Amino acid sequence: MLGEFEYLIITAAASLGENAYSAAIRDEIVRATGRKCSLGALYTTVDRLKAKGLVKTAMGEATPQRGGRAKRMILVTAEGAGAAEQFYHAVTRLTRNVAWAPRGLRVALCR
Amino acid sequence: MPMNFWNASRWVELLARWLSPGDRETVLGDLEEAGESGAEALLSIAGLLIRRQLSVWRNWRPWVAAFGLSMPASFLLMGFSVSIAQTYQSAIGSMVSPGLAILLCDIGLLAAWSATGGFALGTISRRTTWISAVFSLLPCAFCLARFRIDSLSRLCLLLFLPPAVAGLCFGLRTSRIRFGASLAVAIVTTALTIPHWNKPGAWLPNWMLSWPAWYLVAIAWRRKVLRSGFDAR
């Protein structure tokens, strides 16, 4: 089972698609959660996901806004997508009867 | 123009040198893109380095390298270095004697133990080599400070260092060793310990200092088996 931060990284990377690289994923997580995301936490978690075979990384192009330095592109593997889906369903199932669950979700899951 | 000591971006560059070249490139690029500079960037990169180091210590390898090999082997090899220096003192003057043969055997054994220990250290945990080196040098500093044999120089404590450093450099440069070569080194090392088998308490240094040679045989054998399995496919 994925951890919360691992899930956030995989989901952000999947939503960014071909443009998923460390800085963009970090921005996406900060935007979605409103929390600060440290570079250390991001990189070490990506390392862990890579070791588990849930993401792949590759060096991308260099851009002027990065001072001519290359990006570290992150690609979600099929196993990574499966693990994120499992996490999502577990959280959704667990949330269906609580007060803060969206009404639509409560109805959909109770059927 | 002299660089400002308190210039944070200079420290960021310095800290980034501890990262692998690929990581350095992407981390500095990410900081630039995020517009992080100064203390913020310094904290980010220091946090990454600390997390990286801590994550390495989740594995058994750095623990074995530091506490199972570096520290105890340093103490034992220093003791053996002093013993060789004393044997040399007693053997000198008699060019053909059992003492000279024992001295030559012991020098070979010291070189073999030190070199295989250094090689194993470089192979077991590359990313914590500097910590293992510190754990190896601490006993040296301790013993150098308390050395009290008037007839010998303090430096004789460190006779083991040159072959150990050579083995470590070789292990860091190439972690691969051929099965035949590793087996030959392990057999020769073990054979050189035979004159010490009847000495009381010799089993501890024999066992403690010989295991790296047999560890190298084990990893070379494992690589050989894996390769033959790969070739068979």
Image (cartoon, rainbow, N blue to C red):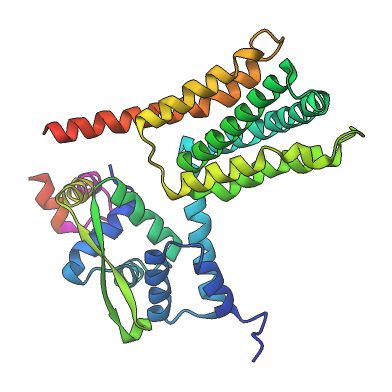
Residue A34 location, x and y as percent? 38, 69
B207 relative to A40 in the view: left or right: right
Taking B233 as reference, is A13 above or below it?
below
Residue B168 location, x and y as percent? 53, 44
Q: Quadrant of residue B204?
A: top right
Q: Is residue A90 magenta?
A: yes
Residue B197 location, x and y as percent? 63, 10
B84 relative to B177 in the view: left or right: right
The answer, for residue B90, to whether it is visible in the render is yes
Give whichever of B198, B233 is nearer the camera. Answer: B198
Taking A34 as reference, is B114 above or below it?
above
Give whichever of B68, B203 is nearer the camera. Answer: B203
Give whichever of B23, B204 is nearer the camera. Answer: B204
Residues rendered magenta in the picture? A89-103
The answer, for residue B68, to whether it is visible in the render is no
Q: Residue furthest top?
A: B198
Going 86% across and 37% down the picture, which residue do you hit? B146
Going 50% across and 80% down the picture, which residue do you hit? B37
A32 relative to B117 in the view: left or right: left
B75 relative to B64 in the view: left or right: right
